[in-house]
Image: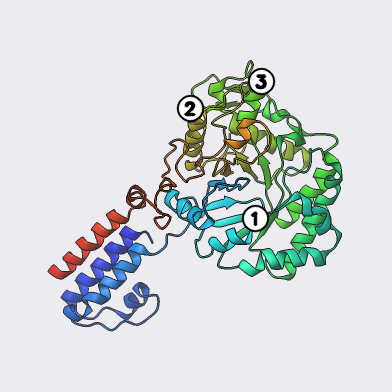
Amino acid sequence: MPALTSLAFLFAIVFKSSKTGPTPPLLQMECTSSVYLPTFHMGSSFFLWLFLIFSVIFSPAKHSVTWTYGVNYGRIANNLPQPESVVTLLKAAKINHIRIYDADHGVLQAFKGSGIEIIIGLPNEYLKEISIGEDRAMNWVQENVQSFLPDTRIRGIAVGNEILGGTTIELWEVLLPAAKNVYSALYRLGLQHTVEVSSPHSEAVFANSFPPSACIFRPDVAPFMKPLLEFFSQIGSPFYINAYPFLAYKNDPQHIDINYALFKDNRGIYDAKTKLHYDNMFEAQVDAAYAALDKAGFSKMQVIVSETGWASRGDPDEAGANVKNARTYNRNLRKLLAKKKGTPFRPKMVIKAYVFALFNENLKPGPTSERNFGLFKPDGSISYDVGFTGLVPSAAPPSILVSFKEIAGQGWLRWSYLLVSTAWAVVLL
């Protein structure tokens, strides 16, 4: 139960025990997790009740049943904080869901006991090997998944990244066999209900996406996509799509309203077929994916955005890549996801998304924008303000993980005040 409710509940029990004698056995069981606690005089039970109250206040918070906001933790850089510091950073920001692009053991070990849920990646270069036989998939799953469960909360395996629609055609053919072998290994280990199998796609899998209702899969992609979707439908996996309004705007700034891409006030677009209005491109992109799935025969499959974000810096020909737009996009996206609502086309399907990315990655190839999607700088400080706090600057002593501002932001001072106040009230009683 929520901490304040629990606090009031325990306070009432203390008050009752001091006035009316022993607590009824049923109530004792309810408030002590079925462990019998004998009733003493108020003076001798003070520290027992204080311990219970302290446990409630500082017990780890349970995650929301319906999460909506996650972050991609990419590490193509040589100047990032240690994974242990990243855990501290994520907890300070109250980010409980992340994706990584491999199964790095140092990262998985650092997240042990953190409660943060992770989707790990089976990199593209392993797909051919894993597709050959179940024994190789079994070895990979045992080494990179089973050995870290349950302390590290691995909740998914992304088999490859942006395979279909990409330029490496031979990987199109091995994607489904690799996914099946990974799932088979999980099934044989009894982990199929704990760890999800999926594969993220780029917008390149679509022939068109405007208006959203017109979206279909590319004719050359469809023969590979449909059997993959059939398999994911059988095992209950969602459709993951990397949706970037930034890329759409960058490629056609003359015809796309920047306000439409940034969730700001604008005229939006009207889809005549569905009679739906869209005031932002992000939801239009998600609904385009739903439309393509609908036409392919998978109308019940959920769409989850595996990547989205906005670059804070770019080359001269990369329109819109600046700090102001990045801050606006990510702040407004976070507000949208916090509403826990669906899209115009799928209003009952709550939108979930992983933001790209946690850090700027200085070794990523490509245009300047590729190295500047991070919510945080390599030293752990924020790239721009979207409501998060960061680690202390890199010049600070390495033993200090969080700043005073972070501690206050996490509520420790507030809870300490409540603890002291409650203890004083108990003494008075």
Q: Which residue is mark 3?
A: 252
Q: Is residue 207 above or below residue 28?
A: above
What is the spatial separation of the Cα atoms under label 3 and label 2, in whole angstroms? Answer: 19 Å
Check the image and report above or below for 213 versus 166.
above
Q: Secondary structure at mark 3?
A: loop
- Visual colour scheme: rainbow
Q: Image point 52% across, 55% down: which residue? A: 82
Pick the front one: 73 or 35: 73
Residue of label 2: 324
Contact between labelled residues 3 and 1, with CB atoms less than 8 Å apart: no
Q: Is 154 on the left-hand or right-hand side of 22? A: right
Residue type, label 3: Asp
In contact (CB < 8 Å): disc 3 and disc 2:
no
Q: Height in image: 147 above or below 261?
A: below
Q: Residues within 10 Å of mark 2 (few under 14, many from 20)?
A: some
Q: Position of residue 321 (x, y in %)?
A: 57, 27
Q: Residue at x 48, y 27 (%)?
A: 324
What mark, if any, has residue 120 been given in the picture?
A: 1
Three-letter code, disc 1: Ile
